[in-house]
Structures are given as structure tokens and as C-alpha cells.
Image: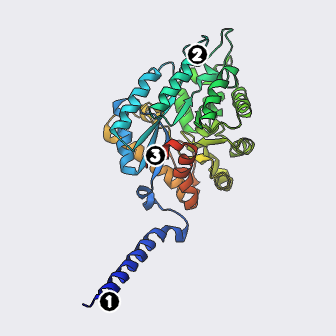
């Protein structure tokens, strides 16, 4: 074969390969929607999980199979491990599963009423971020457990938090805030809208605010969070659990409009979106289109979740299957318009069938935009 013919053959083969690759990549974009078959091929983030024990690494192993990167959230709970132990374990998992998991640090409130608390907290945060933390999490014990020297509940807008929040703002560190609880918490069990809340607060009556009128009200906590956002307009804030406004996309939209520095993750609150979709699917669909840059996919997967504990799920294969099924059901809800029934919602609803560009944002791009360390550490 002559040299020109060989060159022509190579060139034609090259263009054919480009055409085939283009067809493969454009197969989805021609329709504008993903399918169930695309689930495993798309890189995704679950931006809110809890990996606390060696057995929790089953979630990481399933994430590898389902093309997820996980954000492991440390929590300052009075009944959990000390924060420094949680950090050590998180760092161990990052070393064991590089590019598969990142972690968000937290702060201790143990010495809140001491004069050294601010310095101790800032020192711990600086140490955490020097070791690779990509965000910081504040928990619902602010507002529902922490008290000052007068025995009054301390809210998130308390002045003592201001230097901490200012440090995060100055250093472009995102704050993941679980401030408040689902509105169902202040209702009797029989009036709760989704099974997940009913199951959780049946198992945790100490956190069922309907039984504890001596605690702050739902709106007390929401208003304190809003006042904090007004004081810190440049803080990169991610409201965990749909910003504790899970019960109404209208109410959540009001806050997203008012606070441009606020995004939300969906951890353990997708069932509330599904519940609203039973009667107002188009409203929920349009909410996702309008706020597509402010929503982060998340699940709150953890071994202590009520849907695992109540079923007595302990077999490793079953735990991994549980994670896979949760992720797959959510993918079905967001990418298709199929009729669905799920364990946590009573009634049937249709999936939202969101365009590919919206799916890419809520599953990947928003996580990397609002939590820059994710993209840096998980290339």
C-alpha cells in the first residue's frame, strides 16, 4: 500500500473513531435525559454520609461500584465519639480509599462557657483543614441542647459563633449546618407526613419536640438560622437536610431567594420531596429547574439509620444492597417520570425526569462548586 493510501486510511480511521465516540457521548444529549442504564456510568457525589466504624466502610465499597464519591460528615454529638477520634478515623478511611471519600470536620461545644473556647475551636479547625478537611459541620445541638451559664438555649446567631463564622468566610470554607429539625418533629406521630420521620422519632422520643414543649419552637430555630445568614452574607452555607425546610419547596425558595450564599443538601429529606410530588409534582419539578445551582445530592447513609435498625439489617451484603437500592431509587426519581412507590412515603408519585444538565449539577457540579475541596481531592 502506498504511503498516501496509508495516510488516508489512518485519517479515515481517526475520524471514524471520533464519530463513534461522539455518537456514544451524544446518545444521551440527543434526548436530553439520562436513563436508569446511565446510573453506574455517571460520576456522582453523596455529600452527606456518616462513616464512623470499620463496618461503615461497606458504604464506601458500594460507592466504588456505583460510581459515587462520599463526603463523610463528623458530628459533635453528646453520645458519639469525641471529635478528634472521628477525625482520626476519617483520615484513616481517606488513606485507605483515596479519591473515594472526603470528610467534613466539626467543632466541640464541650467548653462552650469557658473563655478559651474560641481559641480552642479555631486551633482545632486550622488543624483539621491542614489535614485535608473540606468543610465544617455544625449540628442541631446548637439550639436544642447547648445552654449558656444562665440555663438558656444557645442559638446559632449567638455572638460567640461570629469569630468562627468569620474565619470560615475569610478562608472560603463551606459550613454545613444542621440547624433545626424537620417540621414533623413538632407534630404527633400520627400527623407526620413521611414514614422516615415517624420511625426515627418513635425510636428517639427524646428528640421528638412534640413531647417537649420546654424546648425552642420550630420557627425559633429557623429564625435564628436566618439571622445568622443575615449577619454573615458572604459565608458559604449549605443547609443540611434541605435547610430544615423540607416540608415546603415554597418556603425553601423564599430562603434561597433571600440568601444567595445559601445552598442545601437533600440528606434524608428526599422523601419529603416525593411526598410533595404526590399532589404538586410540577411545582417540585419547576423548583429543581429554578434552583438547579443550589441543590446537592445527599442521603445521610449510616448504619444507625432507622430503616436499617428496625429491619435488623446486619449482613454485609444486605447493607451494601441497601445503599445501592437507596441510590438507585433516588436516581429513578430524579431522572425518569415513572410511577413510583417508596418505603418512606405513603402513596404513589411520578419521577421528576430532570434534564441531564440539572442532574449533572445536583449530583456532581454543585458539590464541587460549593465544596471546592471535593474537586481538588477527588480528581
Residue depicted at 38% across the width and 41% down the height? 60
Coordinates of residue 112 in the picture (x, y in percent) = 59, 15
The residue that disc 3 covers is: 326
Q: Earlier in the sequence, mark 2 or mark 3?
A: 2
The residue that disc 2 covers is: 117
Q: Earlier in the sequence, mark 1 or mark 2?
A: 1
Residue depicted at 54% across the width and 53% down the height? 333
* Label 1, residues with CA under 10 Å away: few <14, some 14-19, many ≥20: few
Q: CA distance from mark 2 to mark 3?
A: 40 Å
Q: Nearer the viewer, mark 3 or mark 1?
A: 1
The residue that disc 1 covers is: 4
Q: Are marks 3 and 1 in contact (CB under 8 Å)?
A: no
Which residue is more in the foreground, 346 or 164? 164
Q: Nearer the viewer, mark 1 or mark 2?
A: 1
Q: CA distance from mark 3 to mark 1?
A: 57 Å
Q: CA distance from mark 1 to mark 2?
A: 77 Å
Q: Earlier in the sequence, mark 3 or mark 1?
A: 1
Amino acid at each position: 500500500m502506498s504511503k498516501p493510501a496509508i495516510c488516508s486510511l489512518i485519517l479515515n480511521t481517526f475520524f471514524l473513531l471520533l464519530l463513534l465516540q461522539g455518537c456514544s457521548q451524544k446518545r444521551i444529549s440527543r434526548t436530553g435525559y439520562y436513563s436508569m442504564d446511565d446510573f453506574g456510568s455517571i460520576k456522582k457525589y453523596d455529600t452527606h454520609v456518616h462513616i464512623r466504624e470499620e463496618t461503615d466502610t461497606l458504604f464506601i465499597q458500594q460507592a466504588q461500584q456505583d460510581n459515587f464519591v462520599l463526603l463523610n460528615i463528623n458530628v459533635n454529638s453528646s453520645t458519639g465519639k469525641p471529635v478528634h477520634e472521628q477525625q482520626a478515623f476519617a483520615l484513616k478511611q481517606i488513606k485507605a480509599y483515596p479519591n473515594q471519600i472526603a470528610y467534613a470536620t466539626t467543632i466541640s461545644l464541650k467548653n462552650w462557657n469557658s473563655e478559651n473556647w474560641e481559641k480552642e475551636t479555631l486551633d482545632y479547625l486550622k488543624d483539621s483543614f491542614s489535614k485535608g478537611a473540606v468543610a465544617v459541620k455544625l449540628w442541631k445541638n446548637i439550639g436544642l441542647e447547648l445552654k449558656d451559664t444562665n440555663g438558656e438555649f444557645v442559638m446559632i446567631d449567638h455572638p460567640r459563633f461570629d469569630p468562627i463564622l468569620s474565619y470560615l468566610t475569610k478562608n472560603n470554607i463551606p459550613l454545613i449546618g444542621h440547624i433545626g429539625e424537620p417540621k414533623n418533629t413538632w407534630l404527633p406521630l400520627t400527623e407526620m407526613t413521611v414514614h422516615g420521620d415517624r420511625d426515627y422519632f418513635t425510636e428517639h422520643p427524646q428528640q421528638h419536640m412534640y413531647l417537649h414543649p420546654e424546648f425552642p419552637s420550630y420557627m425559633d430555630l429557623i429564625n435564628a438560622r436566618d439571622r445568622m445568614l443575615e449577619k454573615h452574607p458572604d459565608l458559604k452555607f449549605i443547609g443540611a437536610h434541605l435547610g430544615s425546610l423540607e416540608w415546603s419547596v415554597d418556603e425553601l425558595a423564599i430562603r434561597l431567594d433571600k440568601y444567595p450564599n445559601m445552598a442545601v443538601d437533600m440528606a434524608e429529606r428526599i422523601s419529603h420531596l416525593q411526598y410533595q410530588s404526590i399532589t404538586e409534582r410540577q411545582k417540585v419539578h419547576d423548583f429543581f429547574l429554578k434552583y438547579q445551582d443550589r441543590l446537592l445530592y445527599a442521603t445521610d447513609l449510616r448504619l444507625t439509620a432507622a430503616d436499617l435498625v428496625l429491619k435488623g439489617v446486619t449482613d454485609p451484603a444486605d447493607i451494601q444492597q441497601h445503599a445501592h437500592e437507596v441510590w438507585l431509587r433516588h436516581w429513578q426519581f430524579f431522572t425518569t417520570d415513572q410511577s413510583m412507590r417508596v418505603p418512606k412515603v405513603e402513596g404513589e408519585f411520578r419521577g421528576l425526569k430532570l434534564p441531564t444538565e440539572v442532574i449533572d449539577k445536583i449530583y456532581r457540579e454543585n458539590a464541587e462548586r460549593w465544596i471546592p475541596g471535593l474537586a481538588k481531592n477527588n480528581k
